[in-house]
Image (cartoon, coloured by chain):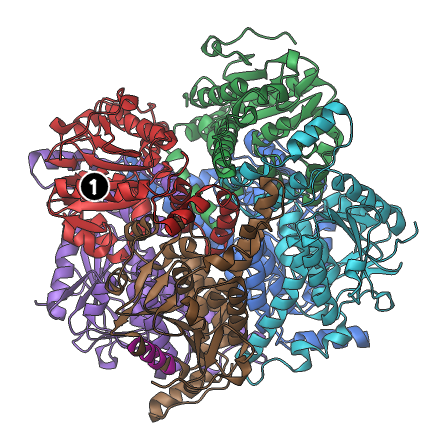
Chain colours: A blue, B cyan, C green, D brown, E red, F purple
Amino acid sequence: MSTPPPLPAYLTYQFMHVTSPCPYLAHLQLNRPEKLNAFSRPMWLEFGRVFRQLSLDEDVRAVVVSGAGGRAFTAGLDVVSAREEGPMSGDDGGGDPARRAKGWRGHIEEFQGCISEMERCEKPVICVLHAISLGLAIDIACCADIRLAAQNTRFAVKEVDIGLAADIGTLARLPKIVGSTSWVKDVCLSARDFTAQEALQVGFVSAVHDDKDKAVEAALEMATRIAEKSPVAVQGTKELLNYGRENSTAASLRYTSVWNSVALQAGDMPAAMMGVFSKKKPTFEKL
Amino acid sequence: MSTPPPLPAYLTYQFMHVTSPCPYLAHLQLNRPEKLNAFSRPMWLEFGRVFRQLSLDEDVRAVVVSGAGGRAFTAGLDVVSAREEGPMSGDDGGGDPARRAKGWRGHIEEFQGCISEMERCEKPVICVLHAISLGLAIDIACCADIRLAAQNTRFAVKEVDIGLAADIGTLARLPKIVGSTSWVKDVCLSARDFTAQEALQVGFVSAVHDDKDKAVEAALEMATRIAEKSPVAVQGTKELLNYGRENSTAASLRYTSVWNSVALQAGDMPAAMMGVFSKKKPTFEKL
Amino acid sequence: MSTPPPLPAYLTYQFMHVTSPCPYLAHLQLNRPEKLNAFSRPMWLEFGRVFRQLSLDEDVRAVVVSGAGGRAFTAGLDVVSAREEGPMSGDDGGGDPARRAKGWRGHIEEFQGCISEMERCEKPVICVLHAISLGLAIDIACCADIRLAAQNTRFAVKEVDIGLAADIGTLARLPKIVGSTSWVKDVCLSARDFTAQEALQVGFVSAVHDDKDKAVEAALEMATRIAEKSPVAVQGTKELLNYGRENSTAASLRYTSVWNSVALQAGDMPAAMMGVFSKKKPTFEKL
Amino acid sequence: MSTPPPLPAYLTYQFMHVTSPCPYLAHLQLNRPEKLNAFSRPMWLEFGRVFRQLSLDEDVRAVVVSGAGGRAFTAGLDVVSAREEGPMSGDDGGGDPARRAKGWRGHIEEFQGCISEMERCEKPVICVLHAISLGLAIDIACCADIRLAAQNTRFAVKEVDIGLAADIGTLARLPKIVGSTSWVKDVCLSARDFTAQEALQVGFVSAVHDDKDKAVEAALEMATRIAEKSPVAVQGTKELLNYGRENSTAASLRYTSVWNSVALQAGDMPAAMMGVFSKKKPTFEKL
Amino acid sequence: MSTPPPLPAYLTYQFMHVTSPCPYLAHLQLNRPEKLNAFSRPMWLEFGRVFRQLSLDEDVRAVVVSGAGGRAFTAGLDVVSAREEGPMSGDDGGGDPARRAKGWRGHIEEFQGCISEMERCEKPVICVLHAISLGLAIDIACCADIRLAAQNTRFAVKEVDIGLAADIGTLARLPKIVGSTSWVKDVCLSARDFTAQEALQVGFVSAVHDDKDKAVEAALEMATRIAEKSPVAVQGTKELLNYGRENSTAASLRYTSVWNSVALQAGDMPAAMMGVFSKKKPTFEKL
Amino acid sequence: MSTPPPLPAYLTYQFMHVTSPCPYLAHLQLNRPEKLNAFSRPMWLEFGRVFRQLSLDEDVRAVVVSGAGGRAFTAGLDVVSAREEGPMSGDDGGGDPARRAKGWRGHIEEFQGCISEMERCEKPVICVLHAISLGLAIDIACCADIRLAAQNTRFAVKEVDIGLAADIGTLARLPKIVGSTSWVKDVCLSARDFTAQEALQVGFVSAVHDDKDKAVEAALEMATRIAEKSPVAVQGTKELLNYGRENSTAASLRYTSVWNSVALQAGDMPAAMMGVFSKKKPTFEKL
């Protein structure tokens, strides 16, 4: 699979490589392969910005995320950079623990905020995990809608091994997106590696493919199918599933009825139905 | 398996066929086989009414739901009828999008309300999915307590394919009743078919049987076993599990203690214990 | 595997046998084997007290729980004792149903409170289920962080068979810790037995071992690995995962940033990183 | 003030007298003056029905509620009728406290449901309290949007004086609609009378008028002004204030943006702005 | 008003003086007048214990709280003692900020837990504030059901003046029990004194009396009236109002129906009604 | 009162005039007096930015907000600009109501987000309302911590008069910050003017001053007093009060203990206590 050229609209990014292998599709590659795609602060700031842009870009209807190169999706935090940026560098607001805490809080919230942009992106995001996928790799994967893995993926919620509790989202999201709490606590408390097969069995990923290329290809096909559908239907489905995960059934049904009271006034339902009856692929206005 | 005669108490329904294959058991069949049991508005209004009646009927301790005929549990919404009823027919409150939205909101809430009666029914409901089980089939199945499937079931959260986000409950409930969010989003965003085996593996159904008859038989046996137990214990268990799914552990423990503070004053615990010691099947007062 | 001697600090317990097979590790055995480790009121009061002590004991970094003897983890409530204690003995506050309800409420809340101390314990708890594991066994297991099982475990949410809805936590917690609601309702409404394999498949336990000894050994090894890690990281991870299970993602991310704003000021992160670079096992201050 | 004739659309009610003193306005009078407007079960069933009808009636944009006659808004529950209806008559599901509890629960929920229809009514409801306003009078008033009182109103949350905790809504709503919890608990725990002046001072009512006629007149004037405004704006404001009372600020802002994303597409904003600039009273389409 | 002798059941307390000025009534005086009733750790531990005992004591139906002596309700935390107890004494878990944080967390939670016992007490608690009422005085008052004040009360949420945010409950509860958030933030951020009149006007207290004796007398009269009523009704009313303050209206109505489904089976409603008809004061069984 | 010169750090704003009348204090004036300080889109974008900057500026410990000139705090939305910006200009995403809804949603969320920055600002904000204070003026005031008013303030929740429900925060926040829901609904549904005295009586503002100058002076004095206190204590108090307003008491107590477990490690408590004993004004490190 040859990589298409970068999209002009996204040329300003240094660590994010965005291409469009086919219409309405964006493929974002974490692009710092010489460091195993490990994240420095400039990189996570870019990560947030690119997803804000993808969310607004009406030429994008689905996003696939993978890591550049064959060695890693991402090795997680770039520990060397981390020591020179933010509170770990001593730039933590100073004298006493309460003031340093404020520095840390600001730092963590900025970092969380950037990664969460992937979850807030209104278009479906399919994340392809492959090779080294440690620490922050899991935080990121938890923000995706659908997770696929290559057979060679080496997963770990690695944070306790460097002396901290994962704070960029894994501990907040993992108990909500995988059914077996016993497994979730096992991997988070032990920091042990787990395989793609294990990730599939517990439902963290929904498919495993032979290698990275096959997994990316499968993700692109899935994204293509989604991108061909009504964007009103697809984006509404993402919004309502996220709402349903976080709210009571009663609140969720209410929100759904308000949401759909206008979504159903789109031209998409008639167009889609016409497509069903005529067996022709419908086209939908941009969104 | 020969079908027992309809229950006199439920003779007034047109699209709901209710029989009692054994004491304390109701078997409800969606009964519009010539339309693949697809739902028109009169049919979902009946669906709500029958569950309100089953919930109150003290001769019913467990309910099994299946579709009449061999071709479908249900093909979902009857699109042809939908075009002549409610907002799609133009009867949507009129002139501007805000007024039409009110029409849609009322329509969706009525529809949601009817289907939710199955969840609100105080007796356990076992849903047998078989053959075509699309769209609304999933909304309905999500309201059941236990889901079984026949091997030949063709499942799909089909709504995005007709240009809308599923609004009768699937998106509100599915993230709470299946552990793998990656899978949930995959099937909801892609509208792809999935099989009974796949439904079993992710935990959407808890058993798969060779064909519809075997699945219904298994459901009736399960329901029979449940109906032989204390209705105070069984109905309390359903109530408390539903509460537990929607509320924090602390709130749930508190609610449980208040609920059981009177439930434990029933005659059922002594009767059940006597049954355990005497090895005779206990009988319980109606509820 | 020879059992180590009881820990002096825990010698005052009658039904709880606490040893330390290796540093920073506590192994708690439910110790009433002649009654299949069934719980009387004095026993659950002890259960609560021992977990309060373990939570505060800075020489303990992980806890393994199992049942003494080969016949049972626990057979659940000691029904004979139950008839002589609390409301079942007639000591239920007296005359009318409202007054008896107050007696029952107090009784249930005390019982819930004792079992919940296992969940509140700030150190990870690994629960090994084996042989007979009925009723209260499930309530207890639901409070653990990680659940392992021996091949011979006979599981059942048995309460409906004695005429009541499980009220010591199973119905509040099970829907949150196992992904398949259909399975959860099946086992809770039918009170049927299920095997270790089934428990593994639905994610209630995260591993099954050949027999009790092997399962305990595996639990101790897992606990040892956890106990070697930073206690700030491990205890924070437990706290944040529990918080994440009960709260919205947004609330959880916020709580995480506040929590870690001080946790990251520990000496553990530098020590752990030094360990990674030097390939020497780091040591951490007590917590 | 002479009373206008009853509205034809509401002629089927026995205890509810509905007139339209001016366009788009409904005046509902509790109409059982010979019993001080005390409520029997048929009366509260009617109360629910009339509000469902008012909510849907697009010729109604605001509702005023008062009691017929000069002696009472309502004296509350008709205790004599209560003894012959529902669980107090012995028709409570029978044998043991758990079964009777189910009877009571059904009875309370039906009663709560009927009174809550006033809160669910999508049009603003102004409640005029006057003379005897005890027990259920407070439950009802809590469901109104705006409360006015006549100088002679005798208020009391009377329930503890007849041996029960108020269960038709006062205890659920009063802490949310009056700022001083100390006052709320004082009047609910002591069942003491309080005056219109006291109700005004703590904010339970927002105005007091000299006598019932003046209060009703003021309510009708207020309702008239509201009925002249955009129904999209008014009904949205009611919905969003109710949502804001029950949900977090963040959730509420989100719901608001979804709600208004279609409400702002109505013709009402241009019409209203035109009215402002032209100083002519705008007219709005029905809703 | 002469003080009655201490109640035998409460003789073991050092800083809590409990008398019973009339049947079913307990009057608790904070009793360290030589220190302006300031709280040391032994004193708040006792405070928690006495409320647990009062909550269970079926001879107590209402509680009045005041401070011994004329100079203070309480001056708040005993700063001198605080320096010798808990984390401020250096006994804070040691070496690094994360470990000290655990010490502080445990300390704050123990302190919060003791004061919160007043809120958890199932009997209504009326708090009489008088003279010096600073810092912890407000935390305590927020846990009462009804607050009365003497004219000479000097109130202040004093904590920011000693360099901390109030953490024993004021900041958690004050926004929920006083309507004007602007006022709440004013007094909490400025730490300024406010008078009984101001407290009355914003609804923090519900009455002001000329001096401490008159205020205590009024509280005892109010408590006496409450104690004469059905304890099932009174304790249920307290429970349901507290629940209503913390939960949505829908959740609250549901909880109310479950609670009252057994409370209404007490003998109290018939006894109370008989009392109303016969104009004789009813008597109620203990609770 | 002569206005101090603008602060250099804030010179880039066009519609926001920021001065520092005394150390650690910022005075922000809405500065478009020729348009009665009405808001165009560039102005609300600036409003958000200035509060993000104030929140981070460690030389700012308290903020006062008022309107430039004597005629208005703000007249609300600049309707003329609104017609040329965002969805009202036709730039609303186009063709069908669902697509236009997305445009409106984005527009409303951006606007809400900018105004909410005032609430998120970690320093206390005192808002001085004066003269014309309509529509958006109330949305803004609801985000302040403390509200003061000049005697001549003309308040109105004006939105229904221009055909919409207020969507920039008033309807989400007002029910939480004023105790009397009856009053809240009266002013929101009727859009009527209310006076400073009325605002004071219901607790919307906590003081009224003779004219704008006096009110600003009072606000600056209040802010000065707050700015002299420990910033750890003050900012923690703001955070915990906001948390307390939005969360249950139990959640709030827990969050408080975690928050203060590090805040109490600041140097501020010892410094403040030293100040109390030495009667010298303490100084605190920046935050």
In the rendered image, residue D279, in percent from the top left (x then y), is placed at 33, 92
Q: Is residue A44 visible?
A: no
Q: Residue at x 57, y 26 (%)?
A: C88
Outermost residue to the right: B2
In the image, which residues are magenta?
D214-224
| The quadrant where residue B130 appears | bottom right
For disc 1, the chain is: E
Q: Is residue C222 visible?
A: yes
C74 sits left or right of F115 in the view: right
A236 to A116, vertically: above or below? below
Give the quadrant of the C terminus of chain C. Answer: top left
E97 sits left or right of C88 in the view: left
Count of residue discs: 1
Residue closest to the eye, B139 or F14: B139
Helix, strand or loop: magenta stretch: helix
Residue closest to the eye, F182 or B203: F182
Check disc 1 and report the residue beneath it: E128
